[in-house]
Amino acid sequence: MVITIIGIVLLIGLGVITNLLVGKNSYRIAFMAQNTLNLLIFVAVLVQASIYYAQAKIMENSLKISQQSYVGVHSIGINLAKNRFSLRIENIGKVPATNVRVDAEIVVTVPNEQSLKQPIKREYGETSQLMRGNLNIKIRIPLQPWLSEPQTRLIEEGVAQVAVKGTVIWDDEFEKWKHSEFAFSYLVEDDQAQWIPSAIQGAANVTLQPLELKAAGRVTGGEGKQESDKAK
């Protein structure tokens, strides 16, 4: 708006000067002034066009942000009585997510033993769609035979630590290869068990820091909503 007003003032000024110079039969100066006037008109049109283009891009980005898919962890559960781990993936965005892939890992750290790792790899293909709402993806992983009964008891007693880390990758109509990283650790304290968020360092290699997270609080809402210890 300010640029438009300045342009109009310049155009009026140049028009007055041109008329005065023409009145004095100064052809050369009048010719230069007229060309300068045309140049200013052209520049003003370019500036206005660039403003319209920038506004259109802002509107396009706003639409993309408000309408795109957002996929992440809905909840995590572990049922030690049934030796079962579960992970739920949800879409809280507006458009469907396609080609969803989950690449994660369960890490169990037992004192004086080597850490035990169980990979989680799922691919749901380009034809599958993860819609917004309660129709989320549920992944179930048996804890045995890769965990023994004594190790499971150590988890229940809070002696052994359990953590899950990974990445969800998906596509939607706005963008390909979108991703969301997650990391949670299982904390047993005062006979209460809960999953709490853990620090993530780096997109390719997720590093957990479970010992520093006791003050982080419970996992609530959105990505990482706490699920009961009894995985449904």
Image: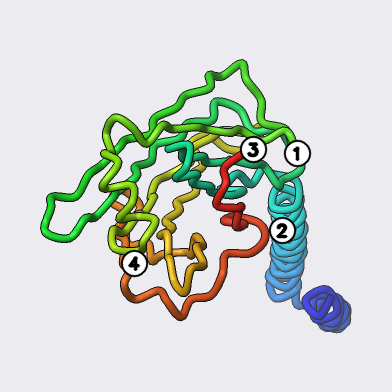
In this view of the protein, can residue 162 be seen by the observer? Answer: yes
**Image quarter hosting the C terminus:** top right
Could you say where residue 176 lies in the image, as x and y percent from the top left?
A: 53, 34
**Spatial CA span between label 2 and label 1:** 32 Å
Left or right of 103 on screen, residue 227: right
Q: Secondary structure at mark 4?
A: helix
Residue at screen point 73% across, 49% down: 60
Q: Are marks 2 and 1 in contact (CB under 8 Å)?
A: no
Classify mark 1: residues with Cα within 10 Å, few (<14), some (14-19) or many (20+): few
- State the residue position of label 1: 134
Q: Are marks 4 and 2 in contact (CB under 8 Å)?
A: no
**Spatial CA span between label 4 and label 2:** 41 Å
- State the residue position of label 3: 174
**Disc nearest the viewer among 4 and 1:** 4
**Disc nearest the viewer among 1 and 3:** 1
- Hey, what amino acid is under mark 2? Ile
| First in residue order: circle 1 vs circle 3 | 1
Q: Are marks 1 and 3 in contact (CB under 8 Å)?
A: no
The residue lying toward the viewer, choosing from 42 and 191, is 191
**Spatial CA span between label 4 and label 1:** 30 Å
Classify mark 3: residues with Cα within 10 Å, few (<14), some (14-19) or many (20+): few
